[in-house]
Image: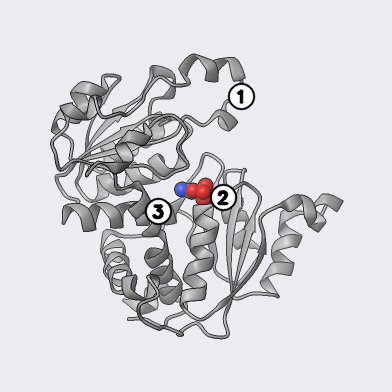
Amino acid sequence: MTKIFKGRDIISIHDFSREEIEHILKVSKDMIPAARGEKGNLSLKGKILSTIFFEPSTRTRLSFEAAMSRLGGSVVGFSDPEITSLKKGETLADTIRMVESYSDVIVLRHPMEGAAKLAADFTEKPVINAGDGAGQHPTQTLLDLFTIWTEKKDIEDKNVVLLGDLKYGRTVHSLAYALAMFGANLTFVAPEVLQMPKEVVEHVERQGGSYTSTNALEDAIESADVLYVTRIQKERFPDPAEYEKVAGMYRVDNEILTNASKDMIVMHPLPRVTEISPEVDTTEHAIYFKQAFNGVPVRMALLALIFDVVK
Ligand code: CP
C-alpha cells in the first residue's frame, strides 16, 4: 500500500481510491499524539517542504508547516507573492523550477483552476494542491473526511448537509465527490444562484450517490448527522452586486439548531464571517476548531506516505 503514495502528486480527490483514502485516515489517526507534540517523530529530518501561496491562507499553510516541523523536517516558502520575483514578471513554471531545486515537496495555493496540475508538469518533485481557484482542495477534503470518520465513527449512510456557497466553494466540490464515494447521503442547501454546479451533481449521480437540493435549511437539518457550513466567498463573485443579493442569507445560530438532533456536528472549513453565530462555538455541535486541528495529523500522514516513511 505505501508504495502507491511514494513521490506522488496530490492534485485532486479523484486521484484517490476509497481504499487509499481509508489508509490515509488510519495513518492520520496514528499521527495524533505526534501532531499534539506528545510524542516525538523525526522521520522527515533533513527534508524540506516549500509552501508557495499566491492567495491568503491561515490554516492550510500553517498546518502544513506544523506537520512538517512535527516530523522533524523544515520549511521554506512565501505567502505574499508581492515580495517575490513574480513581481518582476517571473512565470509560475519558472518559479516551480526554482522551488524544486530548494525543496523536496511543494505545497501550492493559486487562484487559477488547474495551477497545481500545471506546476506538477514542470517538476519531478511531489506537488500538493492547497487550493486552485474554484477547483479543488484535496487535503481539506481528507481532513473533513477524517473529522466525520472520527466524530461519527463511519461515513457510509451518514446524512450530510452542505450549506452556503456550493457554486464557488472548492471545499464542498471535493467533499461532495468523496462523500458520494463513501456512500453518504447528501443534501445541498444554497440559494438558487449558488447551488452545486451541474458537473459535480452529475459526478455524484454517476457514483450512485444519493442527494437532494433545497433552500430550506430548517427542514434539511432535522435528520442531519453533519451540517457542513461554508462562507459565501465575496472574492469569487464576478459582479459585487450579485454577492450583495445573497450575502448573509444563511446564519447558523442556537435557535436554528433546535431543529437538529443533539449529536449533529457542525463543521466549517473556516474562515467564517457571519454564517455561524459565535454562540454556537460553545455548544456540543461545534466541531470546526477541532476540524482545523485535524489538518495537522492528516497532513503529517500525507507527507509521511509521500516520503515512504510510514506503512
Ligand atoms: N480551510 C482553509 O483552506 O483555510 P485557509 O484558507 O485559512 O487555508
Give the mark nearest the N terminus, 2 or 1: 2
Residue 178 shows up from this direction = yes
Q: Secondary structure at mark 2?
A: loop
Q: Is residue 100 above or below residue 10?
A: below
Q: Quadrant of residue 39?
A: bottom left
Q: Where is mark 3, residue-wise?
A: 292
Give the mark nearest the N terminus, 1 or 3: 1
Residue 8 shows up from this direction = no
* Cα–Cα span, label 2 and label 3: 12 Å
Q: Nearer the viewer, residue 251 or 241?
A: 251
Q: Secondary structure at mark 3?
A: helix
Q: Position of residue 293 (x, y in %)?
A: 39, 58
How is the rendered protein coloured?
A: one colour
Disc nearest the viewer among 1 and 3: 3
Q: Position of residue 24 (x, y in %)?
A: 32, 67
Q: Where is mark 2, residue-wise?
A: 57
* Cα–Cα span, label 1 and label 3: 29 Å
